């Protein structure tokens, strides 16, 4: 009976993960046509595929950064078991490398989806700012993959930092007003979000492996305190970035009349759900007889955060709103 129960739980988790991954893929693939409907804005070539590739790239940043972050927290927990789950860093870096290669191929064809490998001008990547940033991301993920397989997997933090910096610079071209300020906001936003999302995934994996309530509750408490600061940073940088692209007097209107605004509104609503689940988990951690019951809302938080990552990938494929 125990074997049947465990098999049922494993099947249920597998189905839940499959549903989440499917939703995460459909959001950037089908989202552009949905949010662009009725706005009068033109869709970019291959926007769905580009959104999906950026979603994979963002997820590939979250996983290893979160593992390193929570790994350090776990090392400070008194009485914590020495065991650690097998790192997903090599798989994440490999997925990020594939996504970066796909995005570089788009840049190499003049921001068009190539129909034939002969259309890809690899040498042309060196001639443009976007091309150089795309090459940097490809090389950085390759380096992160090698570091993850080495005896010092923690060294992958440096190439991953290069990926985050490249994404921040790419999101704010030099023609934009105060591009360095925008890049700084995006860098902080992306880094904090990666630590938060990836850290929660790894924390739950650690709790499952340890099976020690006291150590697990202590780890969740440490993560919850850090996550509160990360949430504050993500919120502050997100608001500032929004106001840079949508002046305060036009925000409400653009949230419903532009594709970017609609996707941003969906992200805000999902973040509100995430905040509610995080608060629920924190209350359970402090007041429940068994603090580890906080894992229930925490798993829901992971699922919704996965959707937030997908919507973030969608946002990168949509036309930037016009400053009215």
Image (tube, grey):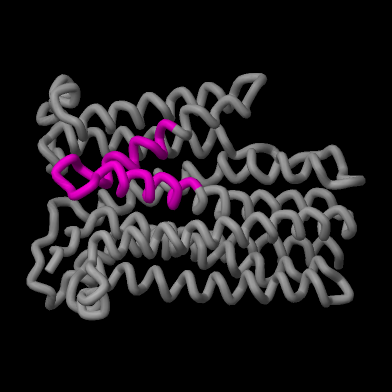
Q: Is residue 160 left or right of residue 16?
A: left
Please tell me which residue lies in front, 47 or 18: 47
Q: Is residue 168 magenta?
A: yes
Please tell me which residue lies in front, 225 or 99: 225
| Residue at position x 89%, y 75% in the image | 289
Q: Is residue 221 left or right of residue 45?
A: right
Above or below for 178 versus 237: above
Q: Is residue 297 left or right of residue 213?
A: left
Quadrant position of residue 184: top left
Please state the horizontal and vertical placement of residue 22, each as a whole percent of the image: 43, 61
| Residue at position x 14%, y 38% in the image | 114
Please state the horizontal and vertical placement of residue 233, each as a whole percent of the image: 50, 57
Quadrant position of residue 263: bottom left
Please state the horizontal and vertical placement of residue 163, each as a whole percent of the image: 40, 35
Please tell me which residue lies in front, 75 or 28: 75
Q: Is residue 59 left or right of residue 324?
A: right
Quadrant position of residue 183: top left
Q: Does residue 22 appear in the picture of this structure?
A: no
Above or below for 167 versus 149: below
Marks counted in the figure total: 0
Above or below for 221 versus 59: below
Q: Is residue 207 magenta?
A: no
Q: Quadrant of the C terminus?
A: bottom left
Q: Magenta stretch: dominant SS?
A: helix
Q: Does residue 290 appear in the picture of this structure?
A: yes
| Residue at position x 26%, y 51% in the image | 49
Q: Quadrant of the N terminus?
A: bottom right
Please state the horizontal and vertical placement of residue 206, each as a whole percent of the image: 75, 49
The stretch in magenta equals 162-191
| Residue at position x 40%, y 47% in the image | 56
Above or below for 75 versus 199: above
């Amino acid at each position: 009976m125990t074997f049947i129960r465990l098999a049922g739980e494993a099947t249920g988790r597998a189905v839940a993960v499959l549903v989440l991954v499917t939703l995460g893929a459909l959001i950037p693939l089908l989202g552009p046509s949905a949010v662009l409907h009725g706005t009068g804005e033109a869709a970019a070539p291959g926007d769905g595929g580009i959104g999906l590739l950026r979603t994979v790239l963002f997820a590939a940043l979250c996983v290893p950064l979160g593992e390193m972050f929570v790994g350090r927290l776990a090392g400070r927990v008194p009485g914590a078991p020495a065991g650690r789950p097998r790192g997903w860093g090599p798989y994440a870096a490999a997925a990020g490398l594939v996504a970066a290669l796909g995005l570089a191929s788009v840049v190499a064809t003049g921001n068009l989806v190539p129909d034939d490998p002969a259309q890809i001008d690899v040498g042309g990547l060196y001639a443009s700012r976007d091309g150089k940033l795309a090459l940097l991301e490809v090389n950085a993920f390759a380096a992160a993959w090698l570091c993850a397989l080495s005896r010092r997997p923690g060294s992958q933090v440096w190439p991953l930092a290069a990926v985050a910096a490249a994404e921040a610079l790419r999101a704010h071209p030099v023609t934009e007003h105060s591009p360095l300020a925008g890049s700084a906001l995006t860098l902080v936003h992306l880094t904090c979000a990666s630590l938060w999302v990836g850290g929660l995934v790894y924390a739950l994996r650690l709790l499952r492996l340890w099976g020690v309530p006291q150590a697990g509750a202590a780890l969740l408490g440490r993560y919850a305190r850090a996550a509160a600061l990360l949430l504050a940073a993500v919120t502050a940088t997100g608001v500032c970035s929004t106001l840079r692209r949508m002046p305060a007097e036009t925000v409400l209107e653009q949230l419903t009349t532009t594709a970017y605004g609609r996707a941003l509104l969906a992200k805000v609503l999902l973040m509100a759900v995430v905040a509610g689940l995080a608060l629920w988990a924190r209350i359970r951690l402090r007041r429940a007889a068994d603090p580890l019951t906080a894992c229930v809302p925490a798993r829901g938080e992971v699922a919704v955060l996965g959707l937030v990552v997908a919507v973030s990938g969608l946002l990168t494929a949509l036309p930037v709103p016009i400053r009215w």
